[in-house]
């Protein structure tokens, strides 16, 4: 099996370094930018297997692999998917074997070839019941359903919206990092860490964004 894994890793590496795009980078112009919603509708769609040259049946079942082989294949597949802008993204901690099994189970999918916005690997097939996908108890759809189950669509003041964002972010961090969630505490969303100069945990991003807005407003003066 090790010889086969080595050859498969070589094939994945080749696919990673030789992405075939249906458009040339030199054709990209800033004024061609379109919103994500519009690109989702207009982006070309390709079979992920045909596009990468890697086929689902080439990926051995996780049960046939050692932990080390699963780790190497998972790392290579994730890097390859990133290069194709069809990233495998999880919002909670998931064992590597289950991650690998999820990619393998769903690799025979179609990908949207996007130029301006990120594309994401589909973690399950449309219509799959929560918890019944390859992720099982780590189902991301179930995670989001639980995260937003008590949320209602309502008009909020800026302070209320910020408090809501803090609440959602804390729930997410607890699910993703468990007992270590405080290491990632979103201080920038907590008004208790504000001072007369704003929130020091914004790291100046608000000022930067304001400067960008000013620049955009003044473009006609140049």
Image (cartoon, grey):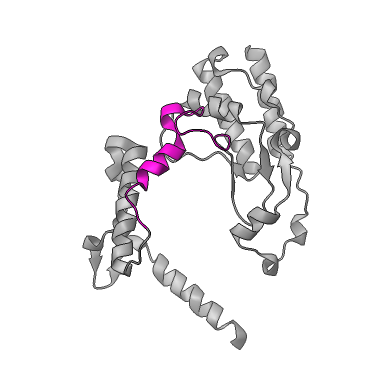
- The image shows residue 62, relative to residue 204, as above or below, that is above
Quadrant showing the C terminus: bottom right
**In x, y percent, where is residue 218?**
55, 84
Q: Residue at x 52, y 15 (%)?
A: 66
Q: Is residue 147 magenta?
A: yes
Q: Tell whether 76 sits left or right of 180.
A: right
Quadrant showing the N terminus: top right
- The image shows residue 43, relative to residue 173, as above or below, that is below
Q: Quadrant of residue 58?
A: top right
Please state which of residues 214 and 112 is positioned toward the viewer in this rendering: 112
Q: Is residue 222 magenta?
A: no
**In x, y percent, where is residue 65?**
56, 15
Which span is picked out in magenta? 124-152
Please state which of residues 77 and 168 is positioned toward the viewer in this rendering: 168
Q: Can residue 222 be seen at all in this image of the molecule?
A: no
**In x, y percent, where is residue 82?**
60, 42
- The image shows residue 134, relative to residue 217, as above or below, that is above
**In x, y percent, where is residue 142?**
42, 37
Q: Tell whether 197 sits left or right of 17.
A: left
| Total numbered labels | 0
The secondary structure that most of the magenta stretch takes on is loop
- The image shows residue 200, relative to residue 178, as above or below, that is below
Please state which of residues 89 and 205 is positioned toward the viewer in this rendering: 89
- The residue lying furthest to the bottom in this view is 221
Q: Can residue 171 be seen at all in this image of the molecule?
A: yes
Please state which of residues 211 and 107 is positioned toward the viewer in this rendering: 107
Q: Residue at x 64, y 60 (%)?
A: 38
Q: Residue at x 58, y 30 (%)?
A: 103
Q: Tell whether 68 sits left or right of 113.
A: left
Q: Residue at x 34, y 53 (%)?
A: 151
């Amino acid at each position: 099996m090790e010889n086969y894994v080595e050859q498969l890793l070589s094939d994945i590496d080749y696919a990673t370094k030789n992405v075939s795009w249906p458009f040339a980078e030199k054709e990209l112009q800033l004024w061609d930018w379109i919103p994500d919603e519009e690109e989702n509708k207009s982006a070309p769609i390709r079979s992920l297997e045909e596009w990468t040259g890697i086929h689902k049946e080439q990926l051995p079942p996780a049960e046939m692999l050692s932990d080390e082989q699963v780790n190497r294949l998972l790392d290579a597949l994730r890097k390859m998917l990133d290069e194709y802008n069809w990233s495998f993204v999880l919002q909670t901690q998931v064992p590597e074997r289950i991650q690998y099994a999820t990619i393998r189970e769903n690799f025979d999918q179609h990908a949207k070839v996007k130029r301006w916005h990120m594309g994401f690997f589909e973690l399950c097939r449309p219509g799959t019941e929560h918890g019944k996908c390859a992720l099982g108890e780590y189902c991301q759809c179930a995670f989001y359903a639980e995260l937003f189950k008590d949320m209602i669509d309502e008009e909020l003041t800026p302070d209320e919206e910020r408090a809501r964002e803090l609440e959602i972010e804390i729930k997410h961090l607890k699910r993703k990092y468990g007992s270590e969630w405080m290491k990632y505490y979103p201080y920038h969303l907590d008004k208790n860490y504000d001072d007369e100069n704003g929130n020091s945990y914004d790291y100046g991003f608000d000022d930067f964004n304001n400067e960008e807005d000013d620049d955009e407003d003044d473009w006609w003066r140049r």
